[in-house]
Image (cartoon, grey):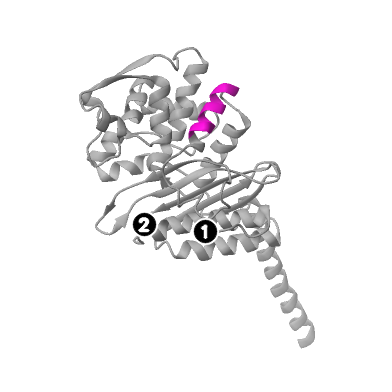
Amino acid sequence: MQFKVEVKLAWMRWSVVAVFWLVWGVSCLQSGTCQTAASGDLLRRVEDIAKTAHGKVGVAVEVLETKETCLFNGDEHFPMQSVYKLPIGIAVLHQVDSGLLQLQQMVRVETKDMVPKLLHSPVRDAHPGGAELSLSNLLWQMVVESDGTACDVLLRVLGGPSYVTRYLRELGLTDVMVATTEKEIGQDESAQYQNWTSPKELCRLLRLLQEGKGLSHSSRTLLLRCMSETSTGSQRIKGLLPVGTPVAHKTGSSRTVNGLTRATNDAGIIFLPDGRHLTIVVLISDSSADETTRESVIAKIAQAAWKHWAGGSPRER
């Protein structure tokens, strides 16, 4: 009798363990973090790198052609900072495609449009008294130079941040919010948290862009060219990739206040040697690490993803 009871208890314990591992396995497959043992190795590498940021880190990586993914805090919300200029650029080009705007049209930049001195703005520095600039020039300044004034002028032309969010909803993107201007962020450090996204959703946006969803071929080509010429963040996604690797990306950075940096971000598309495309988003928020360390976290995660899917050992810069 005692033997039967022990067997029954052992069976019950085994059943509980089996159910636990089954549920765990299903949840991992749903999150896309452990599709294969090799992907698990990449995830563990990402987790180790993320620890050095001394803040919150979110990562989403996807090979577009095979839909292989790696997610780390992929559904968590992070402040975008200037990464939000990417969806703003997409919204501008959508209106160009719709005939509501023209790339050649001139737009008046008033002194009231200028962002505060603490924010980056070559347009403000070059034209302190205001100027008339073409829409295409403002788009280039916003994406390539991450110009805050150009960003706010384009938001004004669009009708405000709410238009961008509405268009994103039309594209089926529900986990990204554009709510404030650059000037508002410059006046209130906490305002940047109102422009948020998840790494996973931002990866979806990059997929839509690469696949040409929502934009004409010419508009998509223009935006990707601007992203390829991005002048900021050379030590982030591109930092440890083989020299000359094509990358189209958009960075986002906040100031460091009282030892805390609220946003150090980079999101883009890496063009792999075999012709495939790797979308990658690394968002770091509320970090106490220095700038070199934060940027190194992004560079090392990008390098790990490149090694995982492209193979070999990329030559470090």
**In the depicted structure, whether residue 126 falls above or below residue 260:** above
Residue 147 is situated, as x and y percent measured from the top left of the image, at 34, 34
**In the depicted structure, whether residue 69 falls above or below residue 288:** above
Q: Residue furthest bottom?
A: 2
Whether residue 209 is visible, yes or no, is yes
Secondary element at tag 1: helix
In the depicted view, which residue is nearer to us: 179 or 310?
Answer: 310
Residue type at the position of mark 1: Lys
Secondary element at tag 2: helix
Circle nearer the N terminus (2, 1): 2
Report the residue marked by disc 2: 291
Please give the label number shown on residue 143. none
Q: Is residue 30 left or right of residue 143?
A: right
Query: How far apart, in angstroms, are the residues tagged by discs 2 and 1?
Result: 14 Å
Report the residue marked by disc 1: 300
In the depicted view, which residue is nearer to us: 90 or 197?
Answer: 90
Residue 219 in the magenta stretch? The answer is: yes
Q: Where does the N terminus fall, quadrant-wise?
A: bottom right
